[in-house]
Amino acid sequence: MRPHHRQVTVAAVAALTGGVVAMAAPTAAKGLFAAGNADKVDGYHAKQLSKVQYWGSDTDFDNFDSCPYVTVMKRTFAAPAAGKIVLNGQVNAARDGDDPDPAALAVRILVDGKVATATGIARLVNNSVREASATTIGGAKVARGKRTLKLQASECTVGMAYLVSESMTVTFSPSGGAGTPPAFRGDGH
């Protein structure tokens, strides 16, 4: 093939290829970027796939000495769809300075009145400092709509606790597993 014919052939192939790409591009783009269900994954809207919420409080509970559980933080959480939630709660505390005896603080979270976390325990022996954190974690299946979350605390020993701050975090997903939290055995909790 002579050099002139090679240049014409290359130009013709390039033009043909460019035309095919140009004609196919709108169809390919429509299929990739303008899909009618691009706002959903497995039937869920993007806002239903995940939700995380955190609450914190510096409410003091002085001379805390209640064996029955007491709600130290109450919040509502709107589940965007039926699914599962993972919960984490924490209460920072110290042994109350008004009582020389050590204390043990137990915490848990209830979802719509049902225990959804394992009991977290903190042993409190020092006087009136942010000594320890009682942390609890668990999960629950939920229906779409508002759920009531209660972070609760209990102190059943001869001492008293001084609660200095409380927090809860909830993470939602429409899929995954949420088992039953283990029961705490001992100290009447």
Image (cartoon, rainbow, N blue to C red):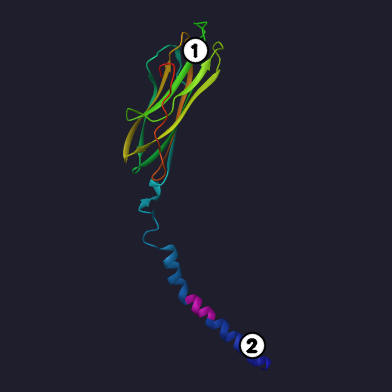
- Residue type at the position of mark 1: Ala
Could you tell me residue 110's position as x and y percent?
A: 37, 28
Quarter holding the C terminus? top left
Could you tell me residue 69's position as x and y percent?
A: 38, 18
- SS of the residue at dot 2? helix
Dominant secondary structure, magenta: helix
Could you tell me residue 94's position as x and y percent?
A: 52, 15
Report the residue at 36% width, 38% height from top: 141
The span picked out in magenta is 17-22
The reply to whether residue 108 is in sight is yes
Mark 1 touches mark 2? (CB < 8 Å): no
> Which one is in front, 99 or 61?
99
- Quadrant of res 54: top left
Considering only order in the chain, which callout, 2 or 1, is on the residue closer to the N terminus? 2
Report the residue at 57% width, 86% height from top: 12
Determine which residue is flagged by label 2: 7
- Quadrant of res 66: top left
- SS of the residue at dot 1? strand
Label 2: few (<14), some (14–19) or many (≥20) C-alpha neighbours in 10 Å: few
> Which one is in front, 138 or 2?
138
Label 1: few (<14), some (14–19) or many (≥20) C-alpha neighbours in 10 Å: many
- In the picture, the disc for residue 103 is 1
13 sits left or right of 27 in the view: right
